[in-house]
Amino acid sequence: MHTTVAIIGAGPTGLLLAGDLATAGVPVTVFERRSETSNLTRAFGVHARTLELLDARGLADDLVAEGARVRRLRLFDGIELDLSRLPSRFPYLLITPQYRVEQALAERARKAGAEFREGARLTGLRQDADLVTLEFEDGGTVTADYVVGADGLHSTVRQSLGLPFPGKAVLTSIMLADVRLATPPEDVLAVDAVGDAFAMVAPFGDGWYRIFAWNRDNQVGDRTPVTLDEIRAVTRRVHGTDFGITETRWMSRFHSDERQAPRYRVGRVFLAGDAAHVHSPAGGQGMNTGLQDAANLSWKLAAAVRGRAPEGLLDTYQSERHPVGRLVLRSSGTLIRAAMIRSAVGRRVRDTLGRILLGLPPVTRRAAGIISGVGISYPGAPRAADVTLRDGQRLYEALRDGRHVLLTDQNLEGYEDRVLVAAPGSTTGEATLIRPDGYVAWRGPATEAPTAVARLVP
C-alpha cells in the first residue's frame, strides 16, 4: 500500500491535519493503534486561538453551542485571569471534552476523503530521499511520501527517528475520576489548590463530571488503583466539599511530563502534538498547542505534495512551532509550580504578587494572550484578526476555502487557483495576504500584491 501522507495517531492533532490535507485534495491515511474510540479523555478546554482555527474549518460554532464558556480562568487561591477582553470572536475558554473535538474533526476528515486504518500498531520506519516505509505489528508495510507522527508521549515515530525527548515528570500520581454529583459546582470550571493538593471539576455536559485531583502526601505509581475515598478526600480538602459524589464510572492515575523534542522534522517525517512536546496540565494548553501545530503544517505539506512549495517552506514548521512549544512549556510550568508552592509564606507572596501583576493591564493582556494563543505570532507573520469583509463575510469564513486570502480592492487576474481575493471592509490603498492558518504572510501597497502572491503563495 502507498499513500501520499501517512498520519500516525488519530487524536485531535492527527485528525485536524488529515481533514486539512484531504480538503486540499491530498491522499492521506490515518493509522491508529486503537480499534475503537473512547471518551476517556484528559483535555477539556479549547482556547480562543484554537476556536479561531476551528472556525476557519466551519467547526467552532457547533462546539461552542454544546460547551460552556469560562471568561475568568481560575489559577489558584482566588487569582483569576480575565479572558473576556481577548481580541477575538471567542473571548473565553470553552469547556468541552476532547472526544467531542475529535468527533467533529474525524467527521470532517472522513467527509473530505481521508482514509482510516484502525488497529494498526506501528513498530518502526525507515526513509530515504524519496520515500518513507512504515512497518506494522502485523508484518505489513506501507510506503508514503511524507509521514507525520501524532502518536503521543510514547511516540513510535519519534523513537524510530532516534530523537531524544529530554525533560522530566512535573507531577506524578494525578488522579482522574468520572463522577455524578448531587450538588455540582456553581462555576463551570471549579479549580483550586492548597499547596499540598489540587482538584479541578469539569463538566462533560451530560450530567457526568471529570475530577482531576492530586495529593502531595500520596505519591504512588500510575498503576496503583484509585479509590473513590481518595477522590472525595482531596476534593473536600481543596474545595471544602466533595460536591456530593453519588456514583463513578471510571477512575485512573497518570503522571504529567514536561518534554520537547529538539527537532520536529527529520527528512520526510514530522512530529506534531504530544509526540513533539508535552506540558503540565496548568492552563489547559496541551491539546490546543497540538491543534495549532497541525494547522501550521497542513498547508505547507499540501504545497510540497503539489510540488509548489517555495524553498525552505517545510523547514518553517520547525522555526515557527518549536519556539511556541518551548513557550508553552515555560508558561504552563510556571503556573503549576506557582500553584504547588508548599509553604504558607510562599503562597502569600505568590498571591500578593499575582494580584499586583494581574492588576496591570499590559501584564494581563500578555498572560491571557499566551495562554489563549491569541497573543502568539510567528516572526514576520502576526496573527490575523477576524475582520468583516465588504460583502459581510468574516475573514475566517473566507479561510474555509483552504487557500491564502488576499484582502485588496484591486483586481487580480490569473491567480484564482492559488488565492482567494476578497475586498476588505475599508479602503486604505493597502493589501494584506493571509496564510491558510490565519497569519499574515505579507502586507503592503495594493499595487504590489501580484508580486507578493507570485512569490509567497504556493
Image (spheres, helix red, strand yellow):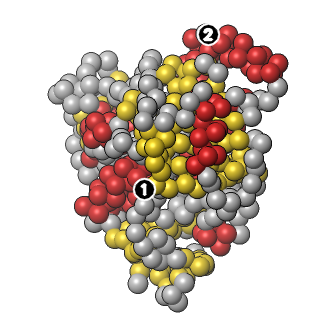
Residue 94 at least partly seen: yes
Circle 2: residue type: Leu
What count of labels does the image hold? 2
Q: Nearer the viewer, residue 221 or 130?
A: 221
Q: Are marks 2 and 1 in contact (CB under 8 Å)?
A: no
Question: Considering the numbered disc 2 on the image, is that residue within a helix, a strand or a loop?
Answer: loop
Above/below status of 116 relative to 354: below
Above/below status of 159 relative to 226: below
Q: Decide: few, some or many residues near mark 1? Use Cα within 10 Å; few <14, some 14-19, many ≥20.
A: few
Mark 2 or mark 1: which comes first in sequence? 1
- What residue sits 29% from the left and 58% below the top? 107
Q: Quadrant of residue 281?
A: top right
- What residue sits 27% from the left and 18% below the top? 427
Above/below status of 366 relative to 129: above
Q: Position of residue 330 (x, y in %)?
A: 69, 37
Q: Relative to 228, is 66 on the left or the right?
A: left
- What residue sits 64% from the left and 59% below the top? 225
Circle 1: residue type: Asn
Viewer-nearest of labels 2 and 1?
Answer: 1
Instruction: Identify residue for label 1.
Output: 39
Q: Position of residue 406 (x, y in %)?
A: 31, 36
Question: Considering the numbered disc 1 on the image, is that residue within a helix, a strand or a loop?
Answer: loop
Instruction: Identify residue for label 2.
Output: 360
Above/below status of 165 relative to 117: above
